[in-house]
Image (cartoon, grey):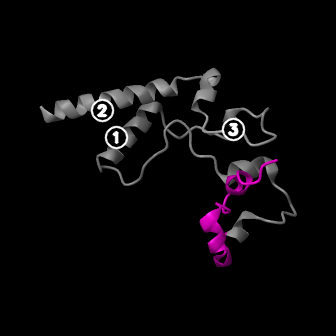
Amino acid sequence: MTLRRTALSMALPVFCLGAMSLWTRPAAHWLAQGPLQQGHEEVSCAGCHTPSPGSTRQQVQAKLAYSLGWRAADVDFGNGPVTSDHCLDCHERANERHPIYRFREPRFEPALQQVRADSCLGCHSEHLG
C-alpha cells in the first residue's frame, strides 16, 4: 500500500512538470524569473536557454531516480541554466578588460561574497543601464 501511495503522491508533480513543458512562447512571460538584460528585447528565449539533453520522459525519470537516491547527479528539466558561455557566444571581445577568469583569483574572494562576479550575469545584474 505504501508503494501505491508513494506513486500517487508523485503523479501530481510529474503531471505538473509535463504540463509546464507543453507551454509555448506566448506563456514564456509567466515562467520568466525577472526582466530581460538591457538590449536583449529582440532576442528569443531560446537564444540563451538551450534545451536539456533527453526527452521529457527521460528527464522526469532521471529526476525521480535522483530523488530516490538511485542516481548520483541531478539533471536539468526542460532547459539548462544560462551560463557565461551563452553570453560569450554573442559578446566575445578580443581585448576584454575584465575577463571572468580574473575574478576567480583568490584576491577577489571577498568581492565574490557580495557579487557573483565569476559569471557574466553576476556583474550585469548589478550594473543597471
Q: Where is residue 128 in the image (x, y as percent from the top left)?
A: 78, 49
Specify whether residue 61 is painted magenta.
Answer: no
Label 1 neighbourhood size at 10 Å, few (<14), some (14-19), many (20+)? Answer: some
Residue where numbered disc 3 is placed: 35
Mark 2 / mark 1, whichever is N-terminal: 2
Q: Which amino acid does label 2 sit on?
A: Met
Q: Where is residue 1 in the image (x, y as percent from the top left)?
A: 12, 31
User: Which mark is drawn over residue 10?
Assistant: 2
Query: Which of labels 3 and 1 is toward the front?
Result: 3
Tell me what residue is drawn at x 56 percent, y 38 percent. Answer: 79
Classify mark 2: helix, strand or loop: helix
Q: Where is residue 122 in the image (x, y as percent from the top left)?
A: 67, 56
Q: Where is residue 103 in the image (x, y as percent from the top left)?
A: 70, 69
Residue where numbered disc 1 is placed: 64
Classify mark 1: helix, strand or loop: helix
Q: Quarter of the image holding residue 61?
A: top left
Q: Quarter of the image holding residue 24?
A: top right
Label 3 neighbourhood size at 10 Å, few (<14), some (14-19), many (20+)? Answer: few
Q: What residue type is labelled 3?
A: Pro
Query: Which of labels 2 and 3 is toward the front?
Result: 3
Mark 3 / mark 1, whichever is N-terminal: 3
Mark 2 / mark 3, whichever is N-terminal: 2
Tell me what residue is drawn at x 63 percent, y 46 percent. Answer: 82
Labels 3 & 1 near each other (Cβ < 8 A): no
Stretch in magenta: 104-129
Report, in whole angstroms, how far the alpha carbon at label 2 lies from the one at label 1.
Answer: 9 Å
| As drawn, 114 above or below 84 | below
Labels 2 & 3 near each other (Cβ < 8 A): no
